Amino acid sequence: MTGSIRKLSFVAIAMALSLFLAQRPASAADVAAQGTFHATPEFGIYGASQNSVNTIITAGASVGYFVIDGLSLGAEFLYYNINQSDLRDDVVSYLGGRRSFNSNVNGFGTNFLVRFYPIHQDNFALFLGTGIGGLFTDERIPTWQNGQQGDYNNWTLPVDIGAAITLSDNVSLDLTGRYQRIGFSGTGIDAFGGHAGIRISF
C-alpha cells in the first residue's frame, strides 16, 4: 500500500511538472530576490523507516521572506494524518497471536525554516533548507516502539532539498524532497518523502 501511494504521488508530480514546464514564461523575476515575500499552499506524503508507522500525509501552507538574495526565513503550518500500527511484541492475545492494529492519528505541526538558494535565476531556483518545530497529535506516535510508548508532543527537524520552477512573474511550482525527524527520543520517527505546492510571491 505504501509503495503504491509513493509511486502514484511521484507519477502525479512528474506529470504536473512536465505540463508546467511546457507553459512557463520565457523570462520572469528571480524568485529568491531580497525583499520578496512568498506564501505556498502545499501537500505532502511520507513513508517511515519504522514498522510502526505506515504513511504520513500533510497539508497546509508555508510563508517566507528573503532577508538577502538567496536566503529566506520562514515558517510552515501543517495538518498531519499519520497511519500507524501497534506491533507490540510483548503483548500476546488470548488466541496466541501478536497484538496488531492500525489507527489514523490527527495532528498539527509547525516548523521554522531557513532556506539557502545556491542557484537562483529567471525561471528556476534550487534550494537547501532546515529548521526546527513541533508536532502535536491526538494520540501517541508511535503507539509502541523500542519497548516504549511514543508521545503526544514531539520536536521536529526537517531537512529539505527542492526546486522552484517559475510559472509566471508571481507564481512558481515548488517541489521539495524532505527527511524529517519527529521526536528526539528512542521512539522518534524517521520520515522520508516530500511535498509539492504553488508559491505566490509578492
Image (cartoon, rainbow, N blue to C red):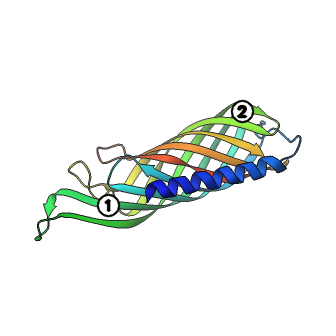
Q: 8 left or right of 142?
A: right
Please, which residue is most extreme toward the top here? 118
Viewer-proximal residue among 132 and 93? 93
The residue at the point 86 percent across, 42 percent down is: 28
Q: Few, some or many C-alpha atoms within 10 Å of disc 1 (few <14, some 14-19, many ≥20)?
A: many
Q: Is residue 48 left or right of residue 62?
A: left
Q: Residue at x 33, y 66 (%)?
A: 102
Q: Mark on residue 85?
A: 1
Q: Position of residue 12 (x, y in %)?
A: 63, 56
User: Is disc 2 placed on a helix, strand or loop?
Assistant: loop
Q: Nearer the viewer, residue 150 or 198?
A: 198
Specify the amino acid type for callout 2: Gly
Res 109 seen here: no
Quick check: 169 above or below 60?
above
**Residue 14, percent from left and from top:** 66, 49
Q: Residues within 10 Å of mark 2 (few under 14, many from 20)?
A: many
Residue 63 shown left or right of residue 93 in the figure: right
In the rendering, at what x and y percent does residue 135 appear?
44, 54
- Residue that mark 2 sits on: 70
Quadrant location, the N terminus: bottom left
The tally of labels here is: 2
Q: Secondary structure at mark 1?
A: strand
